[in-house]
Image (cartoon, helix red, strand yellow):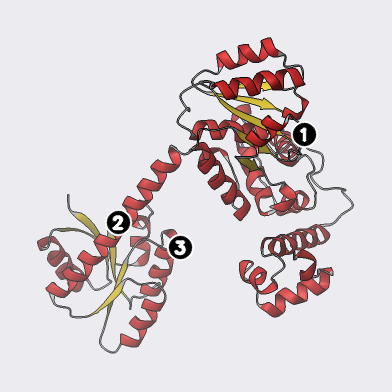
Amino acid sequence: MRVPVLLVDDDVSIRDALAQTLDLAGFSAITAGSFVAAKDHITREFAGVILSDIRMPGRDGFHLLAYARDVDEGLPVVLLTGEGDIPMAISAMAQGAFDFLEKPCAPGDLVAVLNRAVAVRIAALDARTDLARREAGDPAARLIFGVSDLSDDLRAKVRRVAGVDTEVLVTGPPGSGISKVAEVIHLCSSRAHGPFEKRAAAGLDRDAFAHALDASTGGSLFIDEVTQMSADTQIALTETLDAGCDARLIAGNTAALQEGQVMADLFYRLQVMTVRIPSLAERPEDIVVLFRQYVAQASEQAGLRAPDITPEVIAGLMAQDWPGNARGLMSDAMRFALGIQEDLGDGSEIGLAERMAQVEQSLLEAALRRSGGQASEAAKALKLPRKTFYDKLTRYGIRPEAFRG
């Protein structure tokens, strides 16, 4: 299969000569006389590379380069320069051009540069395909949403824990999705094709436990709020674990397990592998991401067009503490999708400016929390100049040292 090269040059004679060279070298030339004519070919799915003149009327090669990098940073752009344009070409390299060639260029030099560019493009597309395949088969990537470092850490922890076939304890504040994370652990494990059974610890007697264990053979048994399990059932569970069984125990609790809340044998078993789900207050960057996901899901289920999520809505979301965490956010998203959400803010009397200030303050505090109170690191994470960052801290009365230790 011939690799496509998008050839952009406003000079017809040069364009035709280059197209012939490309054809003889085994490429498939797609010719265009301007950026406008080339634009529709520049996509993330484009399987080839771009060869473009710099000097063109209207939108020149620099504009084309910037556009291509916005569409896909992994799409190589080779630029052609005229005599005296070398400083311009070097500037283009600094802006992300793959390489540049001075016109007229020898066919051998042109083909050599394009072959290198094609190799880079193929590698990038292959890596992207492999990543998509892994994520398609990676329940942690598909089912645990969020863009924060804490969400990345949670997904990584889930994957690690899933690979070790032992008991697991999942903790998190109310509404954080403990049972969902437990199921993701199951789906990431070698038991994924087996059953996933869920039971509440409260009221689970020996007989009910035995039935649940049988039903989860070859899979996983999730017991929610494990501290509410009766002493008799705890004994049965510990005896079962000691004897060995063909089901994995995943326990859940809305608070960190403390010694004395369950029998000692069970307590120490559950302390070996633990997964803690962070609250939304700890990762405010995820609030809008999760809300968009929940709105899209609710709209699809209801057969409705997803409503626009305006800056005012976002400000209202960020102004709240979300004590109900993901569950509370999901409930609001469902009401919003159905058009029955009255006000996503804490009060309609709060204006947009005040809400945006609350958003800014929460993001500053989250960055300091993640950096352990290191202001320079937090400023860098937020892509803010140090002076601007400190000015904002002063405005909101935020002290970096309060986030240390």
Structural crowding at the residue carrying mark 2, measured as other residues with C-alpha within 10 Å and reported as few (<14), some (14–19) or many (≥20): few
Residue 85 is at least partly visible in this image: no
Camera-nearest label, 3 or 2: 2
Residue 118: percent from the left, percent from the top?
Answer: 25, 61
- Disc 1, SS: loop
Q: Which of the two labelled residues, at mark 2 and mark 1, occupies the earlier sequence position?
A: 2
Q: Which of the two labelled residues, at mark 3 and mark 1, occupies the earlier sequence position?
A: 3
Question: Separation of disc 3 and disc 1 at Cα?
Answer: 37 Å
Residue type indicated by callout 1: Ile
Q: Residue at x 71, y 40 (%)?
A: 172
Question: Separation of disc 2 and disc 1 at Cα?
Answer: 48 Å
Q: Residue furthest right?
A: 349
Residue type indicated by callout 3: Asp
- Disc 3, SS: helix
Is 293 rendered above or below residue 92?
Answer: above
Q: Which residue is mark 3?
A: 70
Q: Which of the two labelled residues, at mark 3 and mark 2, occupies the earlier sequence position?
A: 3
Is 151 rendered above or below residue 195?
Answer: below
Q: Residue at x 72, y 36 (%)?
A: 327
Residue 69: percent from the left, percent from the top?
Answer: 42, 64
Contact between labelled residues 1 and 3, with CB atoms less than 8 Å apart: no
Residue 76 is at least partly visible in this image: yes
Is 393 rendered above or below residue 347?
Answer: below
**Residue 19 sits in quarter:** bottom left
Q: Residue at x 63, y 20 (%)?
A: 239
Camera-nearest label, 2 or 1: 2
- Disc 2, SS: helix
Q: Which residue is mark 2?
A: 123
The front one of 66 and 235 is 235
Contact between labelled residues 1 and 2, with CB atoms less than 8 Å apart: no
Q: Which residue is mark 1?
A: 340
